[in-house]
């Protein structure tokens, strides 16, 4: 996988940017919307940071794999919250029946 991304740097850059954007939006974004100028500056800075991470990826550091692990863990936490909410709803429905 590492060598394939080294042979295809454009694809690696796009994957890094998408994963980085997902991690930012799920973990670091505040609830309120930013003004459009600040949003543009933010995404330009993330694009520059993705370029820096691409250099690290090209130097044989597992950047994409680490981002995939982070996204996987975030999805795992999301599934856990959904299961917990479902159990809470079932317990509330069972409490109303009695």
Image (cartoon, rainbow, N blue to C red):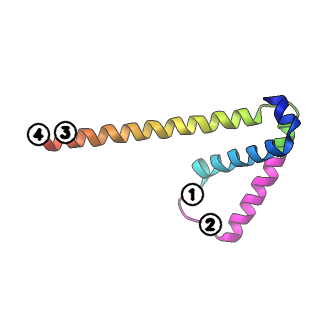
Q: Which of pointers 1 and 3 lies earlier in the amino acid sequence?
A: 1
Q: Nearer the viewer, mark 3 or mark 2?
A: 3
The Cα–Cα distance between marks 3 and 2, rounded to whole angstroms, is 42 Å
Q: Which of pointers 4 and 2 lies earlier in the amino acid sequence?
A: 2
**Residue under the point 32% across and 37% down:** 87
Res 94 label:
3
Answer above or below: position of 49 versus 8: below
Describe the element under mark 1 as helix, strand or loop: loop
The Cα–Cα distance between marks 4 and 3, rounded to whole angstroms, is 7 Å
Describe the element under mark 2 as helix, strand or loop: loop
Tell me which segment is drawn in magenta: 31-51
Q: Which of pointers 3 and 2 lies earlier in the amino acid sequence?
A: 2
Question: With 24 as the anchor, is 55 left or right in this view?
Answer: right
The Cα–Cα distance between marks 4 and 1, rounded to whole angstroms, is 41 Å
Place of residue 70 in the rendered image (x, y in percent of width and height, measured from the top left): 63, 36
Q: Which of pointers 4 and 1 lies earlier in the amino acid sequence?
A: 1
Estimate how packed mark 2 is, as few (under 14), some (14 to 19) or many (20 or more) residues with alpha carbons within 10 Å.
few
Place of residue 33 in the rendered image (x, y in percent of width and height, measured from the top left): 58, 65
Report the residue marked by disc 2: 34
Report the residue marked by disc 1: 30
Describe the element under mark 3 as helix, strand or loop: helix
Answer above or below: position of 45 versus 94: below
Report the residue marked by disc 4: 98
Answer above or below: position of 41 versus 60: below
Q: Nearer the viewer, mark 1 or mark 3?
A: 3
The Cα–Cα distance between marks 4 and 2, rounded to whole angstroms, is 47 Å
Describe the element under mark 4 as helix, strand or loop: loop
- Determine the main secondary structure of the stretch shown in magenta: helix
């Amino acid at each position: 996988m590492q060598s394939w991304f080294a042979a295809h740097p454009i694809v690696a850059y796009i994957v890094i940017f998408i994963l980085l954007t997902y991690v930012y939006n799920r973990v670091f974004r505040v609830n309120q919307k930013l003004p459009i100028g600040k949003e543009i500056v933010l995404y330009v800075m993330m694009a520059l940071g993705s370029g820096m991470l691409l250099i690290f990826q090209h130097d044989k550091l597992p950047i994409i794999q680490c981002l995939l692990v982070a996204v996987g863990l975030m999805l795992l936490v999301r599934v856990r919250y959904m299961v917990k909410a479902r159990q809470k709803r079932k317990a509330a429905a069972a409490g109303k029946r009695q």
